[in-house]
Image (cartoon, rainbow, N blue to C red):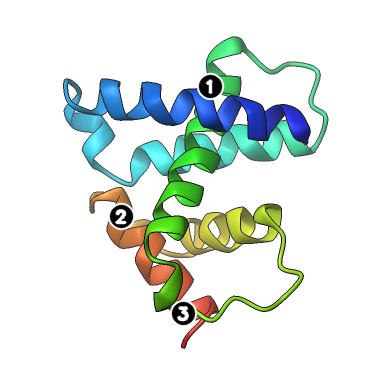
Amino acid sequence: MKVIYRIAIVTTFVFAAISVGHAEWGTAEILLDGWKAFQKLEANDKDVSPSEYLLAGAYAGYIMVFLHGTMNTYKIPAGETPKQVFEVVGKYLDGHQDKWSEPPYKIVREALSKAFPK
């Protein structure tokens, strides 16, 4: 799990740089790809590609950066781990396929607002 956090820091910057030039990064589908990659890593899947490591890191990094920028908006219980927050967003993605064309920040905001209302 520590690997994901290290990758998250680096790939957050990569995510930001790439998102400028790729329209598909403007939708929540990229979060979905990152969520799937994150699940593979958590399951210790031996068939994880280098791009999936980057996607999982970008997914985790995006959520953490978003959360830190909007921390006062949510009431996150003491002891809640980053992994649990990633799972909240991922499960929200799984249950809201109709929103995959929306910007990633909207999905993360909605997921966190529903899971951790203030």
Q: CA distance from mark 3 to mark 1?
A: 27 Å
Q: Residues within 10 Å of mark 3 (few under 14, many from 20)?
A: few
What amino acid is found at the position of numbered circle 3 in the picture?
A: Lys
Q: Is residue 96 left or right of residue 78?
A: left
- Which residue carries the number 1 mark? 54
Residue plotted at (61% across, 60% down): 85
Q: Is residue 26 left or right of residue 35?
A: left
- Which residue carries the number 3 mark? 114
Q: Is residue 73 left or right of residue 34?
A: left
Q: Quadrant of residue 40?
A: top right
In the image, residue 117 sits, relative to residue 94, either above or below, namely below
What amino acid is found at the position of numbered circle 2 in the picture?
A: Tyr
Q: Nearer the viewer, residue 36 or 25?
A: 25
Q: Earlier in the sequence, mark 3 or mark 2?
A: 2
Residue lying at the far bottom in this picture: please name it.
118
Q: Earlier in the sequence, mark 3 or mark 1?
A: 1
Residue plotted at (53% across, 15% down): 51
Q: Secondary structure at mark 3?
A: helix
Picture coordinates of residue 70, whole percent (x, y): 38, 65
- Which residue carries the number 2 mark? 105
Q: Secondary structure at mark 2?
A: helix
